Amino acid sequence: MSIFKRKQKGYLGIDFGAGGIKVIQLAPEGGRGNLFTYGFTERPPEEIGGDYLESAEIAGGLLKQICARARTSVTHAVSALPIPTVFSAVLSIAAVPKKELLKAVEWEAKKLIPLPLEEVRLDYKELNLKGEKADRGEEQGARGGSAESIAVLLTAAPRSIIDKYLAIAKVAGLNLGSLETEAFALIRALIGKDLSPAVILDMGALRSNILMVDRGIPMFTRSIEIGGKRCTEAIAQSLKVNLGQAEAMKRDVSAPAGAAPPSDIPHILQEVLQPLVNEMKYSFHVYRTRNVIARPPERIILTGGGAQIAGFAEFLSREFNIRAFIGNPWERVNVPPDLAPLLQGFGSRFAVAIGLALRNII
């Protein structure tokens, strides 16, 4: 679901992450994306935490440089709003005629969103959670006026933040045709059309996002301020090294593609990651108790820069008694065979950008 839409083909996915900017250009072919080019920047550990949105000139200029060096060939772009900046909820609304649904959604939104509605951009989508198509007439209630409720996914983003993304795109010479949430980009890249329940754990540089996904819908999202930088700081403090050396050490103990997984996470990182696991358990509990239609997740999909910490997936599998594994965002992308090993090495960092670039393709 996008916050706003324009009818166009958007093949350039742009992810403004705390650890750097990722750009990827895909071309459509047979319902898949062909890799055309990609580019990215990486911030050193001590600089992670700056907000790209604070200066359109700086962020836009950097984005323009990335596109030039990557030799992108399109100006139509899609970017993502960070999960903490977006209000998202699944609402249960009393059955109303179809033409009155927008007013009903706005009425519920006023009670939930801590900003005046004129300061946010609303988007909503009626959900088909029971696998049945809605059959509401224009002048009568749902299914003959029954007391049945309507499930709606509501998304709202502050207009002030949207304006900042538009300003950055303008400086970079790009046409920002769509803005959507990171949640939908991750689902598109990592889950696709699979409707079975799953959890996506996106572990970025500063924060980790927990997404409970069912039927391709982000039913519950939670953002925790525990990320890769916290792990780097723990290594630096424990081993008395600087952040640059600690970052290199952290990557050295990350699981390389195709390697046999270790039995457990390094001891230095256990104290950092345990609170994240505890928050996941709490989120599971809240999701099950507050959502009457919740189905238990069948798998945990890890992504983001922290996904490849050695032994982390296996640790989660034991904690939750379900399969946990590192997701492959390149699964729906055609890549040159000689590039495949390289791309797999940092693929988790590109999940959001790939999902954005696939928006008009799959």
Image (cartoon, grey):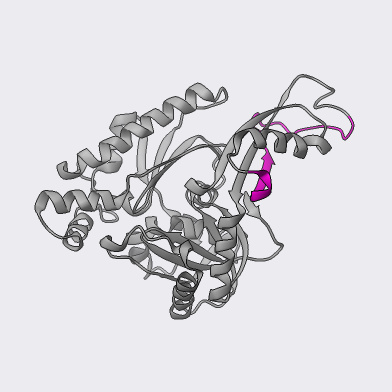
Q: Residue at x 56, y 38 (%)?
A: 195
Residue 104 appears in the picture as rendered: yes
- Seen in the picture, residue 124 relative to 163 is either above or below; the reply is above
In x, y percent, where is residue 58?
45, 72
Q: Which is more toward the observer, 116 or 101?
A: 116
Of the 4 image quadrants, the one containing the C terminus is: bottom right
Q: Residue furthest front?
A: 116
In x, y percent, where is residue 331?
46, 55
Q: Residue at x 49, y 59 (%)?
A: 354
Q: Residue furthest right?
A: 139
In x, y percent, where is residue 15?
47, 61
- Seen in the picture, residue 69 relative to 46 is either above or below; the reply is below
Q: Residue at x 36, y 60 (%)?
A: 19
In x, y percent, where is residue 199?
44, 38
Q: Which is more toward the observer, 125 or 100?
A: 100
Q: Residue at x 54, y 60 (%)?
A: 79
Membership of 124 in magenta stretch? yes
Magenta stretch: give its range: 116-139
- Direction from residue 55 to residue 195 in the image, left or right: right
Q: Can you tell which quarter of the image residue 167 is in?
A: bottom right
- Direction from residue 6 to residue 221 in the image, left or right: left
Q: Residue furthest left?
A: 240
Membership of 106 in magenta stretch? no
Q: Which is more toward the observer, 354 or 169?
A: 169
Q: Residue furthest top?
A: 147
